[in-house]
Amino acid sequence: MQVFERLAEYRYEQLVFCHDKATGLRAIVAIHDTTLGPALGGCRMYPYASEDDAVVDVLRLARGMTYKAAASGLNLGGGKSVIIGDPRADKTEALFRSFGRYIETLGGRYIVAEDVGTSTEDANFIRVETEHVVGVDVTRGGSGDPSPFTALGVLQGMRACVEEVFGTTSLEGRTVAVQGVGHVGYHLCRLLHGAGASLIVTDVEATAVGRAVREFGAKAVEPDEILTIPCDVYAPCALGATVNDRTIPGLRCRIIAGSANNVLLEARHGEALAGRGILYAPDYVINAGGLINVADELEGYNERRATKRVMRIEERIRRIIAISRRDGVATNVAADTVALERIAAIGSMERLHTGHPYGLQVRRRETL
Ligand code: NAD
C-alpha cells in the first residue's frame, strides 16, 4: 500500500501505528483534519483480516468524522482509531491502558471514544492513562448512553423535514416506519408516540418488535416489507445502504430520516431520491445527537446544555434543505457543502491543533 498517496488523496494529517509486544496491542489512529479542533472519534476493535483492511477502514471512518463534527457545529476535527483484535477474546486492562498511553503521546490532537467492539469499561481503562477520552463511566463525569440523544436529534431533524413537505413541524397523525427498534429505534418510537405519530415497526428480533407494539401501539411488519410500506417517513435505524438502485423504485414514503449510518449505498442515490420527490435528511447530520452529547464531556458534562445542542439538529437540517434548494443539489451534497464551507471559513488545513479549545487542564492520572 502506498500510504502517503492515500493520505494525500483526502489530505489526511496523520496516521499513527501503535505496537506494544507485551500487551499484544496493534492499533492505528487516523487524524484526518484538525482545522476546527482536536480530532474526536471512536475506537473500533475488530479482527481485521489484513493490516490493509484496518488502514482503509480507519481512514474512511476518520474522514467521516470530520464532516460530521463540522456540519454539527462542533469545534472538533475528524479522527478515528482501530485496535486489531477480537473484542470477545482479546480485551485486557493492560491492552487498553497501553492504548491510552499512546493516545496521551498525541497531546490532545486526538480524543478517543467508544465504538463498535469497545465499551465504557474499556474507556475507563484508557482514562487511567490519559484525559483525552470521552464516553467514560457516568461516575467519572461521563455522559451515559448516547442512544436517547441520537433519537432526540433524529426526531428534531424529522420535524424540519415534515415542515418542508407538509408545512408544519407537528408529527401528530404522521405515519413513521421505523426499521430496527434497538437502542436508538426504541427511543425514537417513544418520542414519536409522545408526539402523536402512528408507528409501523420491524426488527429481526421478535422481542424488540413486541415491546414497541405493546408500549406504543405500533403496527408490526416483516423486515422485507418496511421499505415498500406506504408512510410519511421511513426511519432507517438498523443497517446502512438500504437506499440503493434496487430499493428506490419501491419506496412509498415522502421523507427518509433515521439514525443509521451510510443510508445511501452511493452518493448518487441522494440525487435519485430527489428525482422521486423524496426528501432525505443526510445521515451524519441527523444522527449526530450521540456525538454532540459525548463531546459535551469536554466541557464538564451538563445534560441540559447537551440536550439543547442536540435539539439544534432541527435548524441544521432546515439549513441543509435551504442550501439544497439554493444550489439545486441533493441534500447529501448540501450537507457536504455545509461541512466544507465551515472548515474553509475557520482556517487552512495546514494548521495543526495541539491546544485545547475546551480549556482542558492536564489533570493527574486517576486510579481505578
Ligand atoms: P442496535 O444494534 O441497538 O439496534 C439495531 C436494531 O436493528 C437491532 O434491534 C437489530 O435487531 C435490528 N436489525 C438488524 N438487522 C435488521 C434488519 N435487517 N431489519 C430490521 N431490523 C434489523 O443499534 P443502535 O445503537 O440502535 O444503532 C442503530 C443504527 O444507528 C446503527 O446503524 C448505528 O450505527 C446508528 N447510530 C447509532 C448511534 C447511537 O447513539 N447508538 C449514533 C449514531 C448512529
Image: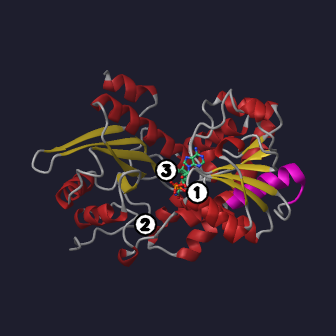
Mark pair 2, 3: CA separation: 15 Å
User: Is tag 3's residue or tag 1's residue first in the polypeptide sequence?
Assistant: 3
User: Is tag 2's residue or tag 3's residue first in the polypeptide sequence?
Assistant: 3
| Residue 339 within the magenta-colored segment of the rendering | no
Q: Main secondary structure of the magenta part?
A: helix
Q: Residues within 10 Å of mark 1 (few under 14, many from 20)?
A: few
Q: Is residue 361 left or right of residue 298?
A: left
Residue at 63% x, 36% y: name it: 264
- Specify start and end residues of the magenta stretch as a single range: 155-168
Mark 2 residue's CB less than 8 Å from ligand 1: no
Amino acid bearing label 3? Leu
Q: Which residue is mark 3?
A: 36
Residues at discs 3 and 1 in contact (Cβ within 8 Å) = no
Q: Which residue is mark 2?
A: 298
Which secondary structure, mark 1? Answer: helix
Q: Which residue is mark 1?
A: 206
Q: What is the quadrant of residue 308 in the picture?
A: bottom right
Residue 325, horizontal then vertical, whole percent: 81, 39
Residue 68, horizontal then vertical, whole percent: 55, 48
Q: Residues within 10 Å of mark 3 (few under 14, many from 20)?
A: many
Residue 194, horizontal then vertical, whole percent: 74, 71
